[in-house]
Image (cartoon, grey):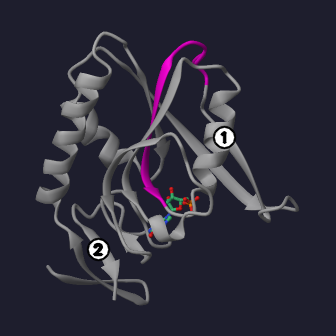
Amino acid sequence: MNKIQIHDKYFEILLENDTISKRTRLIGIQLNVDFDGRCPIFIGVLNGSFLFMADLLKEVAISCEVEFIRVASYEGTNSSGKIQETFGLSTSLKDRDVIIVEDIVDTGLTLAHILAKIHEQKPASVNVCSLLYKPAALKNPIAELTYVGFEIPNEFVVGYGLDYNGLGRNLKDIYRVV
Ligand code: IMP
């Protein structure tokens, strides 16, 4: 199934599941080395990270904790035009090694909001692990973006957790709009 239709748009394969799995395994190995003996807390950002988080954590062999958060954005009157709120952060992050797991860093605005909230709690370290990253779309540099699966062009993508108007999250490959 190389070309698919979701709503009004057509998509073609960008990254096959096998390619994603191999890269995820390598990131897991790197995390095992970098956080050996430190018991980090992984925080997945819902909904988009659910598949990547599950596959990544299967490759993580060190002792760790796992949490999920959700960010809701709605139109408002602040500078970016959107107000964002974070839900689900119940564990204290003070003096912890935090690893935020994202599906994609596009403009980076969502991540900047999450990072600001997390830094308020004075963790020992904060790193971001994102499966996808669109460098051309990024608005401001993100110093914490340490682990990136794939840098991709500034195109809309769907699958493996990412949706187009609610559909496509369950696709095992990642597709780009044609
Ligand atoms: P931001 O622009 O970096 O703030 O991206 C915020 C969120 O928008 C991401 O976590 C995704 O859930 C979603 N998003 C950004 N780019 C895409 C895309 O190409 N396809 C599907 N969702 C996307």
- Can you give x and y, in whole percent of width and height, for residue 9 in the image? 40, 88
Image quarter (top left, top right, bottom left or bottom right) of the N terminus = bottom left
Work out whether 58 lies above or below 70: above
Seen in the image, is 164 located left or right of residue 116? left
Residue 116 is labelled as: none
Quarter residue 173 falls in:
bottom left
Binning the other alpha carbons within 10 Å of mark 1 as few (below 14), some (14 to 19) or many (20 upward) gives some
Viewer-nearest residue: 79 or 17: 79
Q: Amino acid at mark 1?
A: Thr
Residue 86 is labelled as: 1
Q: Residue at x 22, y 45 (%)?
A: 24
Work out whether 4 lies above or below 96: below
**Residue 103 among magenta residues:** yes
Q: Residue at x 58, y 48 (%)?
A: 111
Quarter residue 124 falls in:
top right
Q: Residue at x 65, y 19 (%)?
A: 122
Binning the other alpha carbons within 10 Å of mark 2 as few (below 14), some (14 to 19) or many (20 upward) gives many
Viewer-nearest residue: 96 or 55: 96
Work out whether 43 lies above or below 178: above
The residue range painted magenta reads 90-105
Ligand 1 under 8 Å from disc 1 Cβ = no
Work out whether 112 lies above or below 7: above
- Residue reaching furthest right? 77
Residue 175 is labelled as: 2
Image quarter (top left, top right, bottom left or bottom right) of the C terminus = bottom left
- Can you give x and y, in whole percent of width and height, for residue 121 in the image? 67, 21
Q: CA distance from mark 1 to mark 2?
A: 28 Å
SS for dot 1? strand
**Residue 100 among magenta residues:** yes
Q: Residue at x 23, y 27 (%)?
A: 60
Seen in the image, is 22 located left or right of residue 49? left
